[in-house]
Amino acid sequence: MEFKQSLAQRIIIAFALMSALVAGAFAMGIVATVHLVEEKLISAGLGGDLQRLLLMDSVEDWRHRPEPDQLFYFSGGRGDFELPKDLRHLDAGFHEVFREALSYHAMVEIVDGRRYVLLQDQSDFEERERVLFAVVLVGFVLSLALAVFLGWVLARKVMAPVVRLARQVRHRDQLLGLAPPLAPDYAADEVGELAVAFDATLGRLRQALTRERLFTSDVSHELRTPLMVLASSCELLLENPAIDSRGRKQVERIARACEEMRELVQTFLMLARAQHDDTTMSPQVTLAQVAEDLLGIWREPIERKGIELFYQPGNPLDIRYNATFLHAVMGNLLRNALHYTEQGFIRLTLEPTGFVVEDTGVGIPEDKREAMFEPFVRGNEKRGDGLGLGLSLVQRICDNQGWVVSLSTMEPSGCRFHVELSHVKP
């Protein structure tokens, strides 16, 4: 059975149920006990009164009259003492008798075949029972309310260290190498054991992240040298007047690819170092500057493929962003649109604090839409020449910078990527 409530709610519910069970059983026990005791007492009292009234028939001592709330009948009685027909079937002992709207306690005695019946109005007894039921009910409700309150207080006290531990674990600084251990802040109980387990797990995560950063940083750093050699060689080839136009186009294509690789290496290096506030590693540019720069790069390959490129500059705010990251996000989305679009158009729209990239390509299957920002996931395995890493890199950069990227479909086909840029970094 799967519980949907939180642990604190379960504690409160458990207290309420336990209180309802205990208080209910206690209340029913009180009512039953009081009812039994009163019945015994009334039975004993009526039995004594009946023995006194038997003298009216046995010795004809008519001084022994019933009390005002009592009725006395016997077989062969005269006048008001004549035994009514509705009482002649009663056996000896204690009974409850109902006459129209009234109810009576009855004590029956049979002596020498003659039946003696004493009735006593039980209105007072019923009133006492109603008061008893009201008191018990109020006590039950109050005990239930008290149990809920105590459960709430206890749940807060019990869950306080768990909530604090969860907040500490969720805090992004907990993955830093200098983050203090969690266990010393907690007692040697179950929560303390949980903190020890978190310390061990977070330690392994720190080691894995450190290895990943070092690997990415080393690889990115080492790739710079061959990229610089390629870029320098392309510049020298372009300065050579002997190269023909076809060769010049090929060299220019190599130079553009080297520049893209350089930017990609710089992006990976910055992500590996996780230097959110280091503005010296990358210049700060506006949204419009990046859009115009990337349009100059991608307009030719897009139009050469027979696809229309639309640009709507809009009215973006004069906010500056990390150039490397913004180039990588917008560039990957434009590249992704080019790879998966064979006809129609690609549109880049700037907004006050973000941008939209739309295309009329093959689209993304609904079953893969939520997983498109994971590594090595592609919308259509038969089309495009990528490895499914571009959107993963986009998501990683957006998470790093506090940006938000979302994906929706175009009608009748295509994709719409919306990126909301936040100038306040997390």
Image (spheres, rainbow, N blue to C red):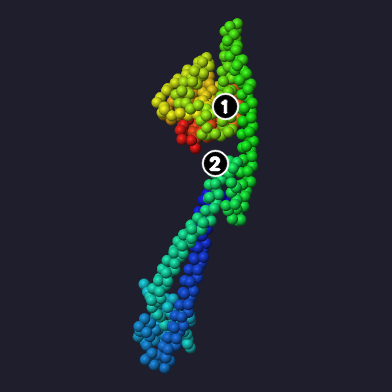
Q: In the rendered image, is residue 106 in sight?
A: yes
Between 190 and 104, the residue placed more toward the observer is 190
Q: Mark 2 sits on what residue?
A: 172
In this picture, residue 410 sits left or right of residue 240: left
Dot 2, how many residues are within 10 Å of its Cα: few (below 14), some (14-19), or many (20+)?
few
Picture layout, residue 86 above or below residue 291: below
Quick one: label 1 or label 2, which is nearer the N terminus?
Answer: 2
| Count of numbered marks | 2
> x%, y% of residue 164?
53, 50
Image x and y of residue 168, in percent: 55, 46
**Residue 379 appears left or right of 422:** right
Q: Residue at x 49, y 74 (%)?
A: 33
CA gap between label 1 and label 2 equals 23 Å
Residue at the far front in the pictured view: 280
Q: Is residue 368 visible?
A: no
Q: Quadrant of residue 226?
A: top right
Q: Position of residue 144 (x, y in %)?
A: 46, 62
Q: Is residue 31 above or below residue 357?
A: below
Given residues 190 and 202, the one toward you in this image is 202
The amino acid sitting under disc 1 is Gln
Q: Secondary structure at mark 1?
A: helix
On residue 142, the disc is none
The residue tagged 1 is 266
**Residue at 44 percent of width and 76 percent of height:** 96
Mark 2 is on which residue type? Arg
Secondary structure under badge 2? helix
Q: Position of residue 46 (x, y in %)?
A: 43, 83
Mark 1 nearby-residue class (10 Å; few <14, some 14–19, many ≥20)? many
Front residue of this view, candidates 60 and 268: 268
Q: Is residue 28 above or below residue 414?
A: below
